[in-house]
């Protein structure tokens, strides 16, 4: 068979450019779908339709197709085109795993082809073989195993499709680069290659230095006026918003600034300790009523002072506690006497009746021989019990 130079017509050139475009779309589909973490199972078709390019029954992902067409449109529908596969952890760390590249070299002066079929048909069949090789090799790289173990709680596999030369510097040191295949065409040699990372460690990223201006701490740029002039007024305004609780005296409310200070002169709930005023009778005259009020006020004042003096000593020792004599409901008048009687009863508990009639030593020795005779008569029962315990499989 003689090789001869092949020159493409305008129709064949347009058809070949169309084949190259769909080759790039199918190649990106195979790469991305191999990193989704799911198995693909398709059935063979005895008769292919017009949408089944390169005899591959693979359902296209619309997002991948749109991204591939956008990348090709940005480069005037020309190669190279790259697919970048990366890993993203739940902490936000990002690491590029591999980069696939489908490119084309400059065409040679002469392209020789030997065959009876049309040159575009032969190139189409070779593109089919290249895609089948890509389908196999894309499942053999280390990132494929990582994609099968991805999850929302650990890490996710991401992809990016772009046109232009591959960015291999993001793969780190010791990257491995392989050429999977090449296909000679009148428009140039189509090359399919892959470069993947070998070191799967995420290095911490260095944070950028913060630039400090020369006038960053300049005192001349601070406000001229004092921003804290009305500090006392602010405390008063805060105290106005405090609401008195239930059963509280509204006259004893203090400003907010005094809530955390201790005043020894004022005893909490001192009004509860004061005795209640006695009701006055209607037949008493005004003079006796005034004298009685003065006497009661003096008694109340003296009682309050005595209580205040007694409470100051306890309040200085335990600032957080106030001891009050309480009369619980349904209790008898003399509670201390009842507690003392209960304590004496527990202290002098009666002896148990079990230890009141203990046998003497002579009685115990006299019954010893009868107990031994009873045990000898029951020896067969004891032996049967021991044999039954030994014969159980759980005790062996």
Image (cartoon, grey):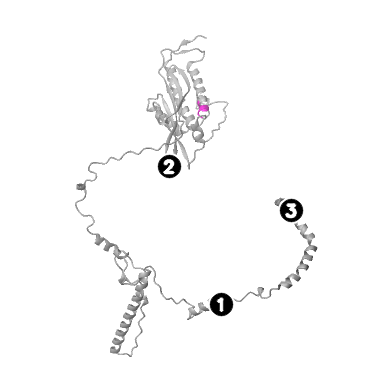
Mark nearer the viewer, 1 or 2: 1
Compare residues 28 and 243 and report the one nearer the observer.
Answer: 243
Q: Tell me, yes or no, whether the highlighted magenta stretch contains residue 137.
A: yes
State the CA–CA distance, disc 3 to disc 1. Answer: 53 Å
Q: Which label's residue is closer to the chain start, 1 or 2?
A: 2
- Residue 322: x and y in percent read 39, 71
Quadrant assignment, res 366: bottom right
Q: Would you say residue 80 is visible in this rendering?
A: yes
Up-down relation of residue 144 to residue 385 (above or below): above
The residue at which mark 2 appears reads as 91
Left or right of 350 in this view: 261: left
Label 2 crowd (10 A; few <14 / some 14-19 / many >=20): few
Q: Would you say residue 34 is visible in this rendering?
A: no
Q: Which label's residue is closer to the chain start, 3 or 1?
A: 1
Query: Pointer 2 and pointer 3: residues touching (CB < 8 Å)?
Result: no
Label 3 crowd (10 A; few <14 / some 14-19 / many >=20): few
State the CA–CA distance, disc 2 to disc 3. Answer: 61 Å
Q: Is mark 1 on a helix, strand or loop?
A: helix
Numbered badge on residue 390: 3
Q: What element carries label 2?
A: loop
The residue at which mark 1 appears reads as 345
Q: Which secondary structure type mostly characterizes the magenta part of the structure?
A: helix
């Amino acid at each position: 068979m003689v090789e001869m130079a092949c020159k493409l017509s305008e129709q064949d050139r347009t058809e070949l450019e169309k084949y190259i475009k769909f080759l790039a779309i199918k190649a990106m589909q195979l790469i991305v779908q191999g990193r989704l973490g799911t198995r693909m199972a398709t059935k063979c078709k005895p008769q292919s339709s017009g949408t089944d390019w390169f005899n591959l029954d693979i359902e296209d992902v619309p997002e991948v197709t749109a991204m591939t067409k956008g990348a090709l449109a940005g480069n005037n529908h020309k190669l190279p085109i790259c697919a970048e596969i990366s890993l993203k952890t739940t902490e936000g760390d990002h690491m590029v795993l591999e980069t696939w590249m489908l490119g084309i070299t400059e065409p040679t002066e002469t392209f020789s082809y030997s065959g009876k079929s049309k040159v575009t048909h032969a190139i189409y069949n070779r593109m089919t073989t290249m895609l089948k090789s890509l389908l196999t090799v894309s499942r053999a790289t280390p990132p494929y195993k990582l994609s099968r173990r991805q999850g929302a709680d650990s890490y996710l596999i991401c992809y990016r499709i772009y046109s232009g030369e591959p960015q291999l510097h993001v793969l780190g040191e010791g990257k491995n680069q392989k050429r999977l295949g090449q296909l000679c065409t009148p428009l140039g040699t189509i090359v399919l290659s892959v470069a993947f990372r070998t070191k799967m460690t995420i290095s911490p990223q260095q944070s950028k230095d913060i630039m400090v201006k020369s006038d960053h701490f300049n005192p001349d740029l601070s406000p001229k006026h004092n921003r804290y002039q009305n500090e006392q007024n602010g405390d008063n305004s805060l105290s106005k918003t405090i609401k008195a609780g239930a059963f509280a005296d509204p006259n004893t409310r203090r400003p907010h600034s005094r809530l955390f200070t201790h005043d020894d002169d004022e005893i909490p709930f001192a009004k509860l300790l004061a005795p209640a005023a006695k009701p006055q009778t209607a037949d008493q005259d005004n003079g006796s009523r005034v004298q009685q009020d003065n006497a009661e006020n003096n008694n109340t004042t003296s009682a309050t002072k005595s209580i205040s003096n007694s409470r100051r000593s306890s309040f200085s020792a335990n600032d957080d506690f106030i001891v009050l004599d309480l009369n619980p409901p349904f209790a008898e008048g003399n509670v201390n006497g009842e507690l003392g009687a209960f304590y004496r009863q527990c202290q002098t508990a009666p002896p148990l009746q079990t230890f009141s009639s203990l046998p003497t030593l002579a009685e115990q020795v006299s019954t010893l021989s009868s107990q031994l005779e009873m045990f000898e008569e029951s020896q067969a029962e004891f032996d049967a019990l021991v044999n039954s315990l030994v014969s159980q499989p759980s005790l062996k």
